[in-house]
Amino acid sequence: MRALCSRHGVTRSGFYSWRRRCLSARDRYDTALAVRIRAVFDASEGTYGSPRIHAALHQAGIRVSCKRVARLLQEGGMKGRAARVYRRTVGTRVFFSGIPNRTLDLETSAPNQVWVGDVTYVKCANQWRYLAVVMDRHSRRILGWSLKPTRELSLTLAALNQALRRRRPIQGLIFHSDRGPEFAAYAFRTRLAALGITQSMKHPRELGDNAFIESFFHSLKADLIHGRTFDTDAHLRSAVDAYIRRYNRSRLHSGLGYRSPIDYERTAA
């Protein structure tokens, strides 16, 4: 130790005093921020530099300067690169294979531990409309939804953002979905990472791990869609909104002890 201190021009007492010293508030914030930055960087497959990571953090409500983000990126050895162009090929899904399924055999004990998302289609004026939904897996409560004529990133982002406006999830929340391109897109993945939400995805040929939200879609179509026609998007949107309100407030679930999702959450609280 004496040799190391001499090499770097510090005294032994000075070194031990530094080691015992507590981290400053700024250093502690930098440490926590670096973890969030690393998550966004990894979610972008290493393609995001400081401007995009700064924007992702800003959208997640984290106020930090772009210079600070750039410094922490550099200190962490993270350097953004240009994204490769991926064309639709047989092996394209390998690109998303780095996101594991984190919900297998996972039992929840309270709301806001696991959210699940999925997309289904319903017919309006003889054309398909796409419905994206975000559900709290513990209570089966629908937290956010979005209805659009096209199946794209904005569809799932709108449903997620509605859920986030209603809930302030704690650190450690898992968001689980299938491997649809809307959930695997950079913008969706980095949005989750900036918020400190861990992403989980269903593996190919796995069955039943998103069963709760699939059950909701079955109920929605059986109770609302089948046997009815919707002439306009406004008509369909109004009907879906009313159904989801009723589903959350009063529809009894056998898996919840014949209580509604909202009533179950109140009991759990």
Image: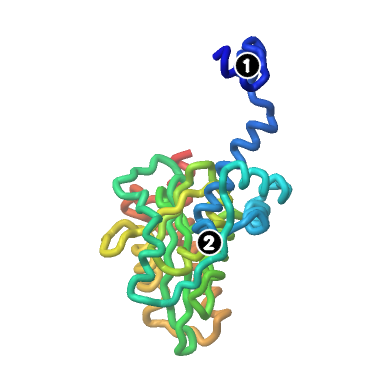
Q: CA distance from mark 1 to mark 2?
A: 51 Å
Q: Disc 1 or 2, which lies upstream in sequence?
A: 1
Q: Quadrant of residue 190?
A: bottom right
Q: Residues within 10 Å of mark 2 (few under 14, many from 20)?
A: many
Tell which tag, 1 or 2, sits nearer the viewer: 1
- Residue 144: x and y in percent read 53, 61
Q: Is residue 260 visible?
A: no
Q: What residue does disc 1 label?
A: 6
Check contact, mark 1 vs mark 2: CB within 8 A.
no
Q: Is residue 130 visible?
A: yes
Q: In the figure, 165 relative to 268: above or below?
A: below
Residue 178: x %, y % from top left: 38, 63
Nearer to me, 40 or 102:
40
Residue pushed farthest bottom? 126
Give the residue pinned by disc 2: 188
Give the image location of residue 147, x and y in percent: 52, 73
Please tell me whether residue 227 is drawn above or below residue 21 in the rendered image: below
Residue type at mark 1 is Ser
Label placed on residue 163: none
Count the numbered circles shown.
2
